[in-house]
Amino acid sequence: MPTPSMEDYLERIYMLIEEKGYARVSDIADGLEVHPSSVTKMVQKLDKSEYLVYERYRGLVLTAKGNKIGKRLVYRHELLEDFMKLIGVADDHIYQDVEGIEHHISWDAIDRIGDLVQYFQENSERVKALREVQQKNEMDEKE
């Protein structure tokens, strides 16, 4: 299994390839706010672990293994963002909260969160009822 740091790189690389068709060291460095030399070192580790194929000065390509994990990591991130929005977390906190928990949550918990998000998304009345409970609780806290 990849480390949390490896996961961040795989997620970013997968997203870049999906968006642009390629991922360059400089794009990865910009996206993760790290130095290009750090990206090069991690890309070499990911190559050694068979998540991607890296040729210096030529670029990189995700392997089937890397692509599968990258796709799953993006799903996890997007699902956690959806969950945070659903439960009413303020937009300006969501990204940081997701980044803080995504590497510390089991895939079993992700699957259960997925079930819960789907349950609410299937019926807007459920979301409305949840919002009403949240508003009531907020009013009770103020009293």
Image (cartoon, helix red, strand yellow):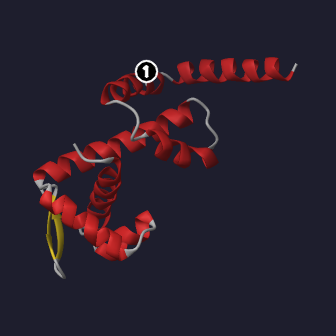
How many badges with numbers are in the image? 1
Q: Secondary structure at mark 1?
A: helix
Q: Position of residue 69 (x, y in %)?
A: 22, 46
Q: Position of residue 56 (x, y in %)?
A: 17, 78
Q: Position of residue 130 (x, y in %)?
A: 61, 20
**Disc 1 packing (10 Å; few <14; some 14–19; many ≥20):** few
Q: Residue at x 42, y 69 (%)?
A: 34
Where 34 sits versus 48, above or below?
below
Q: Residue at x 54, y 48 (%)?
A: 96
Q: Residue at x 29, y 61 (%)?
A: 13
Residue type at tag 1: Tyr
Q: Which residue is mark 1?
A: 119
Describe residue 83's horizontal placement relative to residue 69 as left or right. Answer: right
Where 126 sits versus 103, above or below?
above
Q: Nearer the viewer, residue 46 or 132?
A: 46
The C terminus lies in quadrant: top right
Q: Position of residue 84 (x, y in %)?
A: 53, 35
Q: Residue at x 48, y 21 (%)?
A: 123
In terms of image quadrants, where is residue 87?
top right
Describe residue 81's horizontal placement relative to residue 47 as left or right. Answer: right
Q: Nearer the viewer, residue 87 or 69?
A: 69
The N terminus lies in quadrant: top left
Where 60 sits versus 137, above or below?
below
Describe residue 50's horizontal placement relative to residue 117 as left or right. Answer: left
